[in-house]
Image: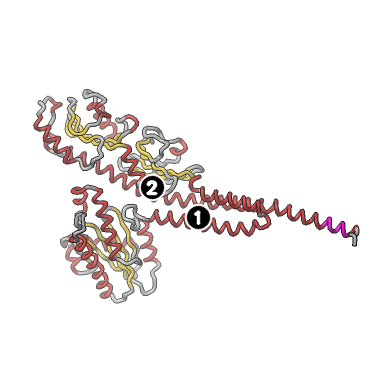
Amino acid sequence: MSETPNNKTANKTTAKLRTMIIAGFAVLVPVMLLFVITAFNMRMGDAMKKQTADMVTNLNMQIKVNTDSYLEVVEGNVHMITSDEEIQSYAPGSGDKKDLSIEAIIEDKLSTYAIYSNYLDYGIVYSDGTTLGNISNDLKIMGTDRIYTVLDKALKKTGGWSSEIVPNRGAAIYLSRINDVAIAVGSIPSQELTTRLKDSLFIDGMNIYVADKSLVIISTTDADTNPGSYMKTNISRSVDRVKSETLISDNYVVATQKLKNDWFVVAVIPSADILTALQATNRYVIAFSVVASLLALGYVIYVTQRIVNSVNQTMDKLDVKAQTDLLTGLINKRSFEEIVDAALNNPEDHVSYALIFMDIDNFKGVNDRCGHDVGDMVLKSFSHTIDTVFRETDIKGRLGGDEFCVLMKMTEEDRAMLIEHVNEVCRRFVDALHRKANSARQSLPAVTSSMGAALWDGAPEGFEELYHKADTALYASKNRGKDTWSIYGQDDVKEAIE
């Protein structure tokens, strides 16, 4: 049967409508997807930038602490020279005759005081051109008749730390006056600072800069930037030298921390690096939506969920790194306080808490005798003992230096039983340290610990109040001879602090 004109018209109309519907979906669905993805990008991009900014700030605060500690060691070593009475009394530049025997003694002392092996300069410069100790060619190239004058001028200008003496900011130099005719100098290569900065990085794409007051770069992990150059303008505009706040621009997230010598540590991560994963996924979604326009809406829901899951996983990993102490792997101070406050403000039913505050007895002596590298290994070993003795459910953190803290969750309701539980855990911790000290395989210096514990009895108090009580108990342990523990509120604590 042949088609009637009406059938032909209907078929044409249906075919035309079908074509219009297909064409409409082929155009409308990708447009809608692009609109949704663009809006999603804007909101998710802003959220990722803010989250990354918080993490970069936390990391940069830790880098500032590590850099300050490193520079303080250099200052301390130089001050050992300036405080030595025999070195102070020797002044050949003031008219006194040179005494080779005294200079030999001073040379021997300088080698003793030089704790670091990576000094570029570590010695003394006299006004008559005499130099003792290790004085690098970077300084000697000035000539013996000018080197003292240059250092004296730099010392008057900066009061201590200087980066302008060595060409291209090749070293960070610390100067200290010994007497009217002698200046002690200690310097470390910029490359050494860079090596330590690289060991601190955890976020891909992030670079760290150490810069002076004028934002001239002294050390950096950026392979495309040389020490001695000014920080890029579009970065320096985001450096807050007053409040040290983290700033987010279209191109960068910039976190600034001021060092104790008035230099700056600046952490920079490009916005493009933050959004790379998101942008790559978007290209995949857009390409797929063009190929399968009729199924695009369903795929958008599926792929968007994958994006959210991927972003959440990335954020979770970065959050864990931002909460962790770089050296020991325990929770850092800021995160520990937040977790403890949250636990105490929203306690579980029939649960009590005990805060145990501990430090390493005479830890400064370990650093002074064995060096900071050995001190770091002692801190790692000490934190491992904490992990071994305390439960996985206990919250373990490093507050800084050799100070550690643990929040124990306990189910005993009777106070006497709580105290017995805390005593037992503290006893096991002390025994574990003793066993490690007496082990034939132990190659590190033996250490002991003083501890103070405070019980939370349900009162409306947070970390600060409980920490103060534990600190008071720790003080009592110190007064009782160290290598022991005390619990706040007991009679022996009151007697020890009175």
Residue 293, horizontal then vertical, whole percent: 67, 54
Quarter location, residue 185: top left
**Magenta part of the protein: which range?**
7-13
In the picture, measured across the screen, residue 230 lies left or right of residue 95, that is right
Identity of the residue furthest to the front in this view: 1
Q: If you read the primary sequence from the N terminus, does the residue marked by circle 1 or circle 2 appear first? A: 2
Quarter location, residue 241: top left
Three-letter code, disc 1? Val
Residue 269, horizontal then vertical, whole percent: 45, 44
Residue 58, horizontal then vertical, whole percent: 39, 51
Q: Is residue 199 above or below residue 129?
A: below
Q: Which secondary structure class fits the magenta region best?
A: helix
Q: Residue at x 26, y 25 (%)?
A: 142
Q: Disc number at residue 6? A: none
Q: In the image shown, does 18 or 85 lie closer to the viewer? A: 18
Q: In the image shown, does 433 or 403 lie closer to the viewer? A: 433
Q: Is residue 12 magenta?
A: yes
Identify the element where label 1 is drawn. helix
The quadrant of the image that shows the C terminus is bottom left
Identify the element where label 2 is drawn. loop
In the picture, measured across the screen, residue 112 lies left or right of residue 205, that is left
Three-letter code, disc 2? Leu
Quarter location, residue 229: top left
Residue under label 2: 201
Q: Disc number at residue 311? A: 1
